[in-house]
Image (spheres, rainbow, N blue to C red):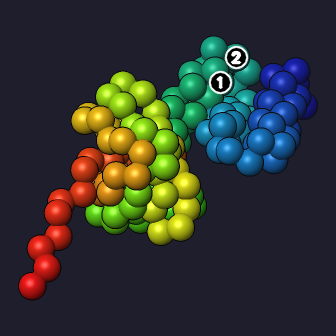
């Protein structure tokens, strides 16, 4: 077993350990490339050829896996955890005046939220959630309800 074979065995082991430690799919492509270069090292002692095989196989593995991982990430989108998106369209009351360009506070569905608005909303005014920016609700004056 030559130096180049030992080099590729060590590379495979290091890349696999790095992948196991991070669990974020950051080095698995390099582990596959190093394994391919290890196989090539058994047939040729040309380190240049081995590095080309390492680079090409790593790139191909990365190119094949990234689109699949991106698609899987979209399919497994994380659930809404803070409920802010669920508040869109709901109505509440202004607890602390909301002035344009400033953050105020509103209560929607019994929860207090930071809020912004394009128009001034005084304390006690009724409001409606138009959108969400992170955990800040974007509110507007609530339409007046007609009674029959």
Q: Quadrant of residue 145?
A: bottom left
| Residue 123 in sight in this render | yes
**Lateral position of residue 129 relative to residue 44, left or right:** left
Return the residue at label 2.
Answer: 47
Disc marking residue 23: none
Vertical order, 130 against 10 (above or below): below
Query: Few, some or many C-alpha atoms within 10 Å of disc 1 (few <14, some 14-19, many ≥20)?
Result: many
Vertical order, 32 against 142 (above or below): above
Distance between the Cα atoms at labels 2 and 1?
5 Å
Q: Position of residue 20 (x, y in %)?
A: 81, 47
Circles 2 and 1: CB atoms closer than 8 Å = yes
In this view, the residue in front, 113 or 75, is 113
| Residue 64 in sight in this render | no
Residue for point 51% across, 62% down = 83
Residue for point 62% across, 39% down = 29
**Lateral position of residue 50 relative to residue 121, left or right:** right
Going by the picture, which residue comes out furthest to the top? Answer: 48
Vertical order, 16 against 142 (above or below): above
At mark 2, the secondary structure is helix
In this view, the residue in front, 27 or 37, is 27
């Amino acid at each position: 077993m030559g130096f180049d074979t030992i080099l590729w065995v060590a590379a495979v082991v290091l890349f696999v350990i790095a992948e196991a430690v991070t669990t974020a799919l950051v080095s698995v492509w390099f582990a596959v490339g190093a394994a391919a270069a290890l196989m090539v090292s058994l047939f040729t002692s040309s380190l240049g050829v081995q590095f080309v095989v390492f680079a090409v196989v790593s790139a191909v593995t990365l190119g094949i896996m990234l689109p699949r991982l991106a698609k899987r990430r979209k399919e497994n989108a994380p659930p809404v955890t803070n409920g802010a998106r669920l508040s869109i369209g709901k109505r509440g009351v202004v607890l602390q005046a909301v002035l344009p360009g400033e953050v105020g506070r509103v209560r929607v569905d019994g929860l207090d939220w930071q809020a912004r608005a394009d128009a001034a909303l005084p304390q006690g005014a009724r409001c409606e959630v138009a959108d969400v920016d992170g955990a800040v609700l974007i509110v507007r004056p609530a339409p007046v309800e007609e009674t029959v």
